[in-house]
Every structure is written in C-alpha cells, then in structure tokens.
Amino acid sequence: MAMAKTAGEAVARIAYLSTHVVLSIQPALAIDSHFSKHLHTYSATRLPGVVAEKAPEVVALRHNVDPLLSAFQPLRSGKLVAVTTSSSVLLPSVPHLYKLAQYPIVIHVSLHASPTPDYSDITAIRQSGFVFLQSETLQEAQDLALTAHALAIKSGKGVMHFFDPANSRDDSPIEPEDPELVRDVLGLNTTRALLPLPENCTSIYVDDGRRATMAEETTSASESSQSDRLTTKGLPSGNVIEKPSSGGGSSVGSSVRESSADSRPTVSSATSIENPSTRPVTSDDVYELLETIWSKINRATGRSYRTFEYTGPENAESALFIFGSTGLFVDELGAAKSSDEFAKCGLITARLYRPWNGLHLAESLPASVRRIAVLEQIRRKTTKWGPILLDVLTSLRTKPSAGGSIMVVGHQLGYIEPATVHQALRGIFQNLSLATPYQNLEVGSRDGPLHPPDHYGLTQPKVESAYMKILDQVFGERLYLANRLGAANAGISATIAASPEYGFGSLLARKDHRSRFIGDVKTAAASHDFATDVPRSWLSKWALSAEDDTVVNTIAPDVIARLSNDGSKLASTLLESKSLFFKESQWLLGSDAWAYDLGNSGVHHVLASGANVNMLIIDSQPWSERAAADATRRKKDIGLYAMNFGNAYVASVAVYSSYTQVLEAMIEADKFKGPSVVLAYLPYNKEDDSPLTVLQETKKAVDLGYWPLYRWNPENEEKGEPNFSLDSERIKQELEEFLKRDNHLTQLMNRHPKFAANLSESYGTEVRALQKRKAKDAYDAMLESLYGAPMTILFASDNGNAESLAKRLGNRGKARGLKTMVTAMDDYPLEDLPTEENVIFITSTAGQGEFPQNGRAFWDAVKDTTELDLSQTKYAVFALGDSHYWPRKEDKHYYNKPGKDLDVRVAFLGGQKLADVGLGDDQDPDSYQTGYGEWEPKLWQALGVDKVEGLPEEPPPITNEDIKIQSNFLRGTIAEGLDDTSTGAISASDSQLTKFHGTYMQDDRDLRDDRKAQGLEPAYAFMIRCRLNGGVASPSQWLQMDSISSSYGNETMKLTTRQTFQFHGVVKSKLKSAMRGINKALMTTIAACGDVNRNIMVSPLPTKSAFHRDVHHISAKISDHLLPSTTAYHEIWLKDNDSDEKQTKVAGDAVVDNEPLYGPTYLPRKFKITIAVPPHNDTDVYAHDIGLIAIKDADGKRLEGFNVLVGGGMGVTHNNKKTYPRTGSMLGYFPASRIHIVCEKIMLVQRDHGDRKNRKHARLKYTIDGMGVNVFRSKVEELLEARFEEAKPFEFKSNIDTFGWQKDEFGMNHFLMFIENGRVENTAEFPMKTGLREIAKVHKGDFRLTPNQHLCLSGVPDDDLDMIKGMLKKYKLDNLHFSGLRLSSSACVAFPTCGLAMAESERYLPELITKLEGCLEENGLRQDSIVMRMTGCPNGCARPWLAEVAFVGKAYGAYNMYLGGGYHGQRLNKLYRSSIMEEEILDIMKPLLKRYALERQEGERFGDFVIRIGMIKPTKEGKSFHEDVAEEESDAE
Ligand code: SF4
C-alpha cells in the first residue's frame, strides 16, 4: 500500500477499513472532497475492509441533499457507518446529530476553508452528544481516525473526528496503518457478530429513545476486558461484546463540568427498551476507553496521545491554548530564539474536545504556568466570551499554579500569513504580559486572503441549464428568477441569495412593491400634475389591466413613451420605476434537496402563502439510483404534496422525454393565479454526465411510471374540464392512490379507455410467488395422469431463442414418451428442485455474461445456497451465446458464462450429469442450432429414449416466403392485431407484413432490461417510413409531418439516408391515425419497407433546374410503375371501421388482388433504385440495386438518358464472409423514355433468380455475382427486347452535400442546411424543429431531403430571400460553421429504436467527432472534407462501406474500423481494426490525421492517402472485400 500523502487520504483509508458503509459527502458528484477520490479508488479496486471483510459500500452524496439522513438505515440494520465530510454540512444537520450521537457512527470532518476554517462549526454542535476528537498532523489524523472508530465500536456512541487539512499540508508522507493493527485496535478479534435493531425502530423523525449503554455488571479491570466491556442496546457491530465486563467508571465528578457526551444522566423510561443491567455511557467510560485504545496504539507504534497535548518547556510560565489551525504557531514556537518573548512558552491543544475533561487539562500543564492565552478561531461568535475560553476558565479555576492562580486571556484568532506569525505571537505575549491584559483581542485578519475556489458554494450544474434556457426562451425579458445564481442583491452571501427562502421573500417584496406602484399609478391617473392630459388616459388604461400580462406588456412601452414626452415631475417619478409597468413571469428555482425534510419547508411556505409564484424544482435523482435507495430517506413527493394542498398548479415534466410538454407546463404555470410547482426531471449521476446518459435515465423513469408526466390545474374544474391530464403512459402507485381518492382516476379511465389497463396496473404490485406455486401444482397434477419419465425443462431467455428451444425440446420429449414440463427458471419454485428426476436447463447469455432477466433470481438463489441436495437429480445444460460478442480478449470468458456456471454449480450441489454442457454459438453456420444439433441426441441417449421409432414429423419452420404467400396480398391479421388492446405488439408474422406497409415494430432498447425486471412486455412502438419520391416535400407536407411527429411520435423526425421522413416511437394505438395523417398530406408509406421496390432517390440540389425537373419526372414515373398493386394498404389503414366498405375499395367492389409485377411472393429481398446527377454522387449511386446516372443531351440542358448500374448493396453480416458490400456494375446506357421499363425488367430478373432460401444471400448483388454481369445483362435485354448502349462519359466529384446558397438557371435560390444525422428536434439550445415549422408557414418552394440526411430549402425567390435568411438566422439554421469532417459525416439511427443495433450510432458519432475536432484544428484540417460514417450494425443503412473512414457497430461501445473508401463513393473500404473502442479509435485517428496533414499530396483525398501509404489495401470489388484486410476478425474464444 502506497504512503499516505494527505490527511484526507489517511483518514479515508481508516474509515474504509473500519466500517461497513462510508457516506462520502461531496460538493457535487463530479467534484471530489478531500476524502472521496481515495474512497472511490479503494472501492473500484474492491479492496476488502477489515470490518466488512469484503469491500464496504461507499455511497457518494451531494452536500445539499440532507446527507446525514442516509446514515440511519444502515446503522439500524446493524452496520457500522463512517461519514467523510466538510464542516459545511454540520450545522444544517443538527436535527440528526442528536440522534446519531447514540449510534456507533464516526464522522470525519475536514474543516472547510472559506477562506480559513471556522471552528465555530464545531463549537456550535459541541452539546450534540458526540465525542469530539481533534487531530493536527498527518500522522495524528491517521491515528485519531482509528481511535475514533475503535471508540465508536466500543462505546456505541457517535464520534466526530475533525481536523484542518491545511495543518498537515507540508507533512512528509506516512506509512499506512497495518490492517492487523487496525483489527486489533478496533477489538474485532473479541467482539461478536453485529445485531440489527428491532424492526419497529424505524422512525427518524421522532426521538426513538435510543441511548448508547454499557453493562452495569463489571468484574475485571484488565485492559483487554475493558475494551470489551461496553454494550449498546440492540446494536451494532463490534460494540456488543462477548464477555460481561468490568471497570466501574471513575466518578464523573472528577471533571468539573459534566460530560456533554452524556447529557442525559438517566434513561428515558417512556421509550426505553433497555435491559435493566445496562446504563448509559458516561464521560468516564469514554476517557477509559480512550486510554485503552491509545495504549494499544502506543505499544504497537510508540506514538502516544493524551486528552490534552502539551508541548514546550517543562518550566514554561505561559502557554497558548489553541483551538484553531496550529500549524504556523507550532513551527514558529519550535524555531523560537531564547531572546523571543515567547521562548519559554508551551502550547496546548485538545485531542479530546468533548467530553471535556478539565482535570486532564489541569494535569497536563506544567506547574510553572501562570498565564494562558486562549486562541479561538471562531468567526461566528454569538457570546461575549468564546466557548473555549469558558471551558478553560472553568477547568483551571480551581487549579493554583506554582505562583498563584492561573490567568486566562481570550483571543480571537483570524487569518495569519506565515510572514506575520512572528509578529502575531509577539502581540499575544505582549498582551499576556500586561498587568491587566485585554480580553478578546483580535489576532490576524478577520477576512483572510482572497477566496480560494469554494467547491461547496453553489454552481448551476451544466446539465441543468436546459430548463433555464427554456424559461429564457418562453418568457424572454419577462422572466424574473428570484434566486438566480450570481444575481445582484443587497450584500447577502451568494449562497443565501440563491436559496429558495430568500428568493421567495424577495419575490413577495417585489410583488408588494408593484402593488404599491399600481396604487401610485391609479392616483396619478386621477391627478392633474402632468404637463398634458395624454399620460392620464394611458395610465388609466394600464391600471385597469395591470395584472394581465398580455395586455400590460403590450401597452407598457406606449405608457413609458407618453410619460417620457410629458416631462413633468410626476412623470419622472413614475419613470423611476418603469420596469414595474411590465408584468413579469416570476420564478423560483429549487432542487430535489427541497424534497427532503430540511428543504421542504420552503415549498410549504410558498404553497401556504397562496402567492402567485412559480417554482421550478429540478429533480436530478436517477431512477436506477432511486430503485436501490434507502427507503427511510423518505424523499417527499412534492407534486403530491402540492396537489393535496389544493391551491396550486402542478406539473411533472421531463425535457428529455417531452420538450413540448415542458413548454406547455411553463406557460400554464405562468398563467395560473396562485402558486405553481413545475417538477422538472433531469436525472444524472454526475454533473458532467453526457446528454445520452441523462436521456436514457429519463426514459426509464418515465416509462416505468417513476416519473410520470402530468399536469394538474385546479382552475380547470371551473371550466368544466378535467383537473388532471396525464402526458405519459404510466403512473406510480402513490399518484394513482391520490387520484383514486379524488375520484379523478375513474373519470380519466372513462375518458381514455385505452389508458385503463396501464393506469390500473401501477408499478410494484405483483404476487409472483403465489402464481409460481399455483402454476407448478396444476402442472404436476396434469403430469400425474401421464406415463413415462419426467423431464423438467427450465429456461432463461432474453430474445426468445432459449424459450423456443426449450419448448421444442419439451415437445420432442413428449413425442418420446417423457412427461415434460417447460417453464422459465424464475417461475419455478426452487425448493422443488431436489425432488426432480431429470432437469434440463437452457439459458441464453445477457449483458456481461449474466443470466437473462427471467433466470436471474433463480441463479442468485442457486449460487448462494448450500441447502439444496441435488444428489437424486440428473441434469443437463444447454447454453446459447455469441463467441464474438465481447470485443476484448479478456472478456471472452463471458461467452456462454451463465450456462457454464450453472453446469458447475449444479454438479457441486450433487446433480448427476446427463450430458456435458452444450454450447450454442451465434457465429456457427446455423447459429446456435449447430451446437444444439450435436447436444440433443446425447440427451436422448442418456435418458434411454434415443431409439424411439415412429416419431411424428415436425413442421418445418415458417419462412418469410411462407408468410408472404399466406398473407393474402399483405393482409395477414394486421387489422385484428391493431384492435387488440391487451398488448402493444402485433404478431410476429404480421410484423413481417407491416414492413410492406411502411412500418416496423420496434421496442425501446434503452428500456428493455428495466421493463423486463418489472415483468412488463417491451416498450413496443412503431417506426413509420414515408415513401417520398426524390425526397421532395411541399411546405404543407412538411407542416403535416411536423404535426404527426408531435401528435403521434416521439416529437422528432428523422430525415433518412434514403431521402424520406421516418417517425419513431409511435405506439400501436396511434399507428392508424399517424398513417392517415400521412395520407392526408397526399403522401404514403406503402412499399417504404418490405421486399419491394422502395423510395426512389434523386440528387437533391437543383442547380440546373430544367435538367433536374426532367430527372424528377422520370423518377416519379419509375416509382409509380413499380408500386405494388395490393389494396390491403387502403383497407387496413384508410378504411373507416364503421363506414361502408365500398367507399374505400379503390379497386372496385370485390377484393380480388393481383400483383402483375411482383406476384404473391413479391421479391426475395428489398430493392432500391437511385438516380445521381453528375457531378454530384450525393445519392451514392454505386450502393443500390439499380443506380442511374443522368446523362444530358448534346446542349447540356435537358435529360437524354441514363447509364445503368446494377447490383450495388450494403448489407453484411459480421464474420460471415459469404456476405459483402458491393458497388454496382455497369450495364450500359439507355434512353430516358423507357428507363422505367428497364428498371422493371431488372427487377423481374431478380424476382425470378434471386435466392429465396437464404435472406442473407437474397439481394440482387449476389444474384449478379452468381450468374455474372454479362449473363445478367443478356437476361434483362431479352425481356426488354432491346440492348444497352455503351456507357456515356460522366464525372463525379464527391458524394457529400454542397452546403450553403446556390442560384439556379432561373434565378431561384436554394439553401442546403446542415441537420446533424437528419434528426429534426427541438432542444433547449437549438429549437430547430420550431424554426423549420415557422419557415414552412411562409416558404413558397420545396423542402428537399438529402441522402446525407440534410435539408435543402429549395426555390426561394429573390423577393423572399431576406425574410428567409432572417428566419434561418433567428433559428440558427444557417449555421454551417462546422468542421469539414462533421459536414461530411453520416450515421444511422441505431439505439434506441433499431432492433438490429449492436452499438450506438446517431447518438454517438457527434461526440466522437467532437473528440477529433481539436486534432483537426491543430493540424489545419478543419475545413477539409473527410467522409466518415457510422452504423450500429453491418446492415449498412448509412452506407458505411463507401466512406473514407467508417465505424460499424460490433457490440455496445465497440466498432470495426474501415479505411480506404473512395471520396466520391466509387470504391469500397476495407477492415482496418476489429472491435475497437473509443480510446483505440482516437489513438489511431489522431496520429493518422496528423500524418495526412503532413504527408498528403496535392488534392489527395484521405481514402486515397491511406491506401498510398500502405495502411490498407484497396477493395477492387465486393467479392474481394474480405481479402487482404489489415486485421482478421478474431474467431478465438
Ligand atoms: S445500420 Fe443497423 S443499426 Fe443502423 S439503422 Fe440500419 S439496421 Fe439499424
């Protein structure tokens, strides 16, 4: 163990070793205290404690959340608790200290230097019942920390150990205390197991009567038994001692003052539950125990301690008693010359401050001392005589010194510079030598040096600024934040001025002031003291509406203008307060600290006042932390409290869940005439958490009902509207109870029947155990009636594979005559396991090699039990996992860990193996089926049923082709599934079919685990993709899309890499409405997904408008030509349930569907067509099934025809070399007039020759590589009855977007703006969605979505240019000041909605780029375009294989890195590194960018550069994508 360098470190280590729980109180969770860094390091390395024997729990708490409240629960459950804190929390915690003093808790206090420590923090709480120990040097800090813990254990009392860290700043590092010595001093070798308190001892709000006590019977005075002598009621750890013991404490009377450690001489009879043979611990007990502890330390280390420490000459005539920072004085006195006034002076300090032992003080002084200067470093002095002075005076009153009685002179110690300490000492001794010295002389300066950084002060955590920005946006200049940090105030400290109580008071004063002003205005309106009559009428008008903000804020400028013109004295007087002519929106800002007792009164005051004040209370506690939190902390639900109060507007909002709802709530709160409480959720673990973490925590809390979104407006009742509106799906139990009581729930359920199931199923009400028992018993009864050996199959399944395998095994077992039962592990009563004959376990692998959710409880019980005797049970285990899931070699052992662990554990418990553990690997050719195929026969053999004949044939698995055939032209049972309100999902086969209708079922991956833990189905929601030919939308279509995303989706829109709108988070009940909304905008979603031709892409920037128009015209023709013909779409989505069917049957009366192009099985896979207009390859023409390159006529003005590419495609499966990306092959040139027929024929060849057996091999690219380009071309030509011509020349310059303004040949303007990764949303910093909505209201041209996910505002006439530019500027949409890398980047959606995502993409790429931008800047590459793309999986939605540098998700946080793509999308890249994480990505990219900057040739692109310098080989065609890679994807386990 390294040497300890600071007192904080030494103390933290002792605290860690000596307790079960350490509460680390910090200025903020992201800012360390003197102790916390060390505590967290020990904790992270799982260093075992001496007391806890394993790593003790370290709990970080912010200083302003009533932190000592967290001590009660562990103390009461029999744990030893240490607290490390600054002294700033002590005074606010006084209500707890009196109770905590009766528990074995140690509070280590580092005195808070602001600017110098104020010891009044200690003296103010000296009567709290704690024992107080003080240390000065580094060594003392360590020894007294240990002393404090030993004393707490032995006495059962609270001990406070305090020190000024500055005192030991220059001390040399010390050896850490030997853990054996710690064990010995703590007395753990002789103490008994710790006992929890009786269960009824739970209240922390009333005195529970607890007193630290000791055994009355004492027999032996031996030292060792003394240490074991004391006992504490019902208590803790080591303080309940085995041997009855001895020691009859010495008389309290030996101290002149009664012990403050035991302020109650007798035990409270009313509340006591004490054993009559015990008595309260007295001060003498404390002294004796200290003696014992210190003599142990002395024997082991040679260092000795006494209750008062005297240093100095034995014949000293005077002494300094310092209660403050001693460092400088010790040095100065030690270096004193014999000529100095203070050469013969001693120094006394108190090691034990409370209980004060006057006798010891007197004894510690040399008899020669006549005068003592008492120096008290106390700034907040409330009495004339300092508390230490009084202590010393009373102690020495009776002690005569050698020459008579001792004179005690008090001094106030302020801040002393090292340079002035000599002078200060001289001053003290000159005073002391006077016949009548001055009392209370001040030494040093009162204020000290300029303030050092004060971490315990208040700062606005960065993450919280989101709400402040919204307030600013909504109310602008009207906003008045009464307790805004840093606001000017009348000389009050910043901390007080920022407190809600101060803010409330100042708001009331402000309101009064304005009321008086309104009175003055009314009087003025009636007076004749103005120069003209004009102001009078304006003032009357103003006074009439003085409280109506919309009216007064409009007329206030006019009133002010009239008064200014008037020039009279009365007008000037009124103008002195001109800001009062406006009506402010007045807010108080608070934190969740208000939800604890000590802050709650502020809220109560506001509510009770009934004043029209708005409170914004930010709650930052993450749900997951709360789930594990101490229930006794009793955080109050301010929302419920306020609703119960009855007079307040209440809203519960979360900016990371619904931005719109935050806006609504703030506006409603402002309008409400009375107190308003807006509870704003912003969960973070540390103040510097990334927005992604905050977003994920928010979603969990809202989804599970911990943080429901709602608004409660008592004024609504008068309007006949409901008071309560629920803005999220679930509510928590407490809220439900409140609503039930107020009968609002019933009303709400009646009004919104779709919520009924959710509302009544509030979280936290399950009867799982009973269900388990019932199900098992019923099954047993059924099995009894069958023959054959029993086989119980228990599964733990994450994504359904293990479950379906278990069920299939069950069916196969049944067919072999076995009595089988299949159930999830967690649904099985564990106590029955020993009675089973044959048990088969099937488990998949979750997280870091953990059990899936529905097997976790089972495994936890099996793992920890020693009671199960499985000697009569035969078993086998099959495990499912992915040997490539863990990118780092050291994590490979997680592969199939649950199955392997279970196999070992069951064997350990006596189980007999039927077969070796079977390992299913997703990487095998048939995935886990490969391993399973080998394992299952072994099982049948072991069970003796392998030779059974006449087994029924199992039906083959249903394929996508079957689903299509049986769907009746894409109908399936979609319509029925939509009507089923018992689930948010639709059936598996329907979910394949809805893709053809443009919607996918997904579930929120951020919430998956937590919902499972709650026993809920996944958070299903649908993604809807529009079909938008060429990515062109009119302004009215834009507005409609905007409104759909807000009303039905998650308030955001995604502009996709295929130029269309995508909405996420649409729940089933809103799906139909959303689809109708899209159709209402004359758009559709049909064939936006599915095995059909998709949306057709076209280059978006119409710089040559006539040419572009021709191309668009052709694209629409192709799109219409290839549309599926089924009427199912209209039937399912657009038909009114209760209307006459004939109205909506677009294809005539009878539904006789026919798909002339596609046939009933449609295409083998999706089919994509794109058109590029050179020189822009911004549609990535090489990456699609058909890529059309537009060729101009001889005049260069109009479209003539197309070069046709075929067989491009991006989708790949990791580690499967049979899959690869491919760039399109050139078929040749074809005139424009029949190009739609060319596309049709290409599609038909694919329809008939594509692989329908293996979807991973079904795209056109494989068909072409299978038959060769020439054969493919001839087949197309055969159908076409025409030939392709030689391809015409063309040139591409890039595949990125051309940002900024462009003018076309007709003089129209087009602006291409940057929308990072296509996400259109509002944030507090950037209200992009609002801006685009406002522009759509006035824009006359089009919105063009780009394939790089940006947006072109197209067709702006010169007349509108200034207006549009102004709006772009206002909403920051004109900002193009991004690095070239960012402007050329693109990411797919991935988490949380994409079900295939293995890693983050859209939410992570911007962060990664930010981390690279410094390096770009340093190397002069800021403006350079480098195409960087990222996807969450190898499906390749953002076309990563064509980027110069790409990252493709492999596992959460890990990516494969690819290099060497062509700058204009013409060449595929190649694998450079596999499974690397951020650190490695940065380690590779930073030097590489530098090298590129230094070594590139003129105009050389990054992708070409990495090939030239030999970092990567070029990929010449798709088939060679996996050859010559820089690093093979590792296969090794
Ligand atoms: S590339 Fe993969 S992770 Fe990204 S959106 Fe497409 S399927 Fe999802």
Image: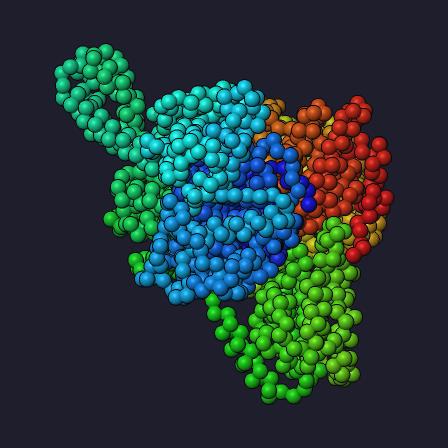
Residue drawn at point x = 42 percent, y = 31 percent:
403
Residue drawn at point x = 79 percent, y = 70 percent:
934
Q: Position of residue 1020 (x, y in %)?
A: 54, 56
Can residue 1482 be seen here? The reply is yes
Q: Position of residue 985 (x, y in %)?
A: 54, 60
Along the viewing direction, whichever of 717 and 153 lies nearer the viewer: 153
**The N terminus: image quadrant:** top right
Q: Position of residue 163 (x, y in %)?
A: 51, 38
**The C terminus: image quadrant:** bottom right
Q: Is residue 1394 above or below residue 135?
A: below
Q: Is residue 907 left or right of residue 263?
A: right
Residue drawn at point x = 30 percent, y = 41 percent:
606
Q: Is residue 869 above or below residue 687?
A: below
Q: Is residue 262 left or right of residue 1307?
A: left
Q: Is residue 891 left or right of residue 832?
A: right
Q: How many numbered marks have been drawn onto this rendered protein structure?
A: 0
Along the viewing direction, whichever of 837 and 1259 lies nearer the viewer: 837
Along the viewing direction, whichever of 482 and 100 lies nearer the viewer: 100
Q: Position of residue 1459 (x, y in %)?
A: 77, 38
Residue drawn at point x = 51 percent, y = 38 percent:
309
